[in-house]
Image (spheres, grey):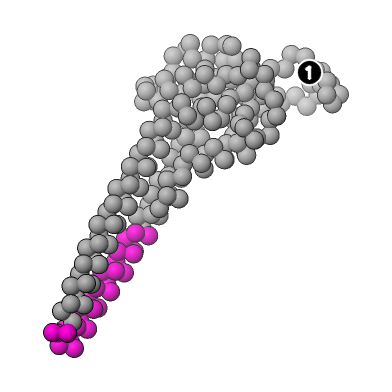
Amino acid sequence: MNNNTSLIWNVVLSLAVAVLFFLHFSSKSSDSGAAADGAVVEGRRTVYVQVDSLLKNYDFFKDTRKELENKNFQLENELTTKGRSLQNEVAFFQQRAATMTPEQARSTEAQLMKKQQDLMAYRDQSAQALGQEEAKKNEELYKNIRSYIDKYNKENGYEYVLGYSLGGGILFANPSLDVTQKIVEGLNKEYKNAGKPAAADTTKKK
């Protein structure tokens, strides 16, 4: 069941590998600032977001992870309780089987098998539903982050907003270009306001 609440690992992996924070707003193919390989292109602005830190401090992500973990914990407890109850019924049947008629024994055994099948079906359906909810939350998480970075970039005019994570494709990132804290503050303000526009100072230029 733990696979159904692997939100943090799914999101970190997808963001790190696919570089989901990558935005390219330059549509000019013949930019006069172009230079040879290895040369610095004057006037182009690039910043980055630390993926792990963003997820760790984004309240929506933390609340979502906690919610899914609680649901998984409740489901495991429920399945454990139902399973023990069924085991007790089976043990009781085994104790009484010798005193039953063949017809009574077959009927009771069929009922117990039906309960076992129903429990397994309930387990599978619940796991599937929890997995679908997790996928929906992942999608919502990505939309929130991408939407806010889009708005943030419109105020700042960066050409690239990169996702930086340990073991990812970016081998070095200058700390002066790190806008993680600003993005986290803006995301949390929007989340707290439950859909209300974020304050203007959250997109203040670096």
Residue 172 shown left or right of residue 12 in the figure: right
Q: Secondary structure at mark 1?
A: loop
Residue 42 sits inside the magenta stretch: no
- Residue 34's spot in the image, x, y percent? 81, 21
Rendered view: 151 above or below 76: above
Residue 37 shown left or right of residue 108 in the figure: right
Residue 165 shown left or right of residue 44 in the figure: left
Q: Specify whether residue 25 is in view.
A: no
Residue sitting at 43 percent across and 33 percent down?
Answer: 61
What residue type is disc 1 on? Val
Quarter-of-image position of residue 119: bottom left
Q: Which residue lies most toward the right here?
A: 36
Rendered view: 48 above or below 104: above
Residue range in magenta is: 98-124
Q: Residues within 10 Å of mark 1 (few under 14, many from 20)?
A: few
Secondary structure character of the magenta stretch overall: helix
Residue 112 sits inside the magenta stretch: yes
Query: Which residue is under mark 1?
Result: 41
Q: Nearer the viewer, residue 39 or 55?
A: 55
- Residue 106's spot in the image, x, y percent? 22, 83
Q: Which residue lies most toward the front here?
A: 95
Quarter-of-image position of residue 108: bottom left
Rendered view: 90 above or below 156: below
Residue sitting at 32 percent across and 52 percent down?
Answer: 76
Q: How many numbered marks, from 0 up?
A: 1
- Residue 124's spot in the image, x, y percent? 37, 60
Image quarter in which the C terminus is found: top right
- Residue 129's spot in the image, x, y percent? 38, 52
Q: Specify whether residue 5 is in view.
A: yes
Q: Nearer the viewer, residue 11 or 35?
A: 11
Residue sitting at 31 percent across and 51 percent down?
Answer: 75
Residue 87 shown left or right of residue 181 in the figure: left
